Amino acid sequence: MTESATRDAAGRRSQWPAVRKIARGDLLEALAAGLRDFRQAPFYGLMFGAFYVLGGWLLIFLLIAFDLPFLVYPMAAGFALVAPFVATGLYAVSYCLEGREPLSWSAVHRLVWQAARRDLGWMALITGFSFFLWMDIAALLFFGFLGLEALSAEFSLLEILATPTGLLFLVIGNTAGAVIALAVFSFSVTSFPMLFERDCDFVTAMVTSVRVVLANRAVMVVWCALIAGLVGMSLLSGLVGLFVVLPVLGHASWHLYRRAVVPPGEVD
């Protein structure tokens, strides 16, 4: 982005960080860089992946234990909303692998803690709220379409897949989920790595993330679809695939952020 693009209509310098146009090739290069970071520090990636997967298994177990199996699918799908926050540790690993600091658990912990003491915590709260909103909407749609009798032991999955009401529920439920996921993706795709690296407020980070998406609509739709596809395949594996998918996408998100948002003091 040129310097003039960082000015408002009156010719004054904008307070917002400048964003760049990116191409699909940048997505491939970010993924390649993410895979490279994972291969350079696999233990770190697997540990963060294990934390995410074990948390998912625990939530699924609790939902089944409390007779709430209808929430397992939306929980598993919506769990991806909090993944950018979990990936903060992976941003720290990539940060160290760039040579800014020697890589160690103490360095990763210190960097994440420093970011959490700034506005990263507020961003985590926003995405957490989005996750609970997602779950509430899923529950309301489930009972609205299928009624309380869907909780009975006689109710089967076939009644969702083989009835007009059940199919309509799936269409509307997945559409609502897609809208929420796209909204969260728009304001969080670069905001978490930005809040990790920079001392800025979460509103600036969210607005910058949305500006990145608006400036690169087609490319970011591809990135969103790629994330959804990889996470979806991981869900089909019983979350096992997330041991690798989460760290690779986490590292790749860091590198994509570095390409999409101009560093402080630099002008393209």
Image (cartoon, rainbow, N blue to C red):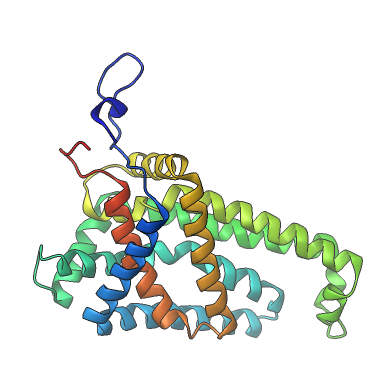
Residue 33: image quadrant is: bottom left
- Residue lying at 49% horizontally and 45% vertically, measured from the top left: 217
In the image: residue 13, left or right of residue 182: left
In the image: residue 104, left or right of residue 47: left
Residue 15: image quadrant is: top left
Residue 215: where, in percent of width, then height?
43, 40
In the image: residue 123, left or right of residue 156: left
Residue 68: where, in percent of width, then height?
69, 77
Give the position of the N terminus as an image quadrant. top left
Is residue 120 at least partly visible in the picture?
Answer: yes
Give the position of the C terminus as an image quadrant. top left
- Residue lying at 21% horizontally and 46% vertically, measured from the top left: 199
Q: Nearer the viewer, residue 201 or 147?
A: 201
Is residue 87 at least partly visible in the picture?
Answer: no
Q: Is residue 126 above or below residue 151?
A: above
Residue 94: where, in percent of width, then height?
22, 67
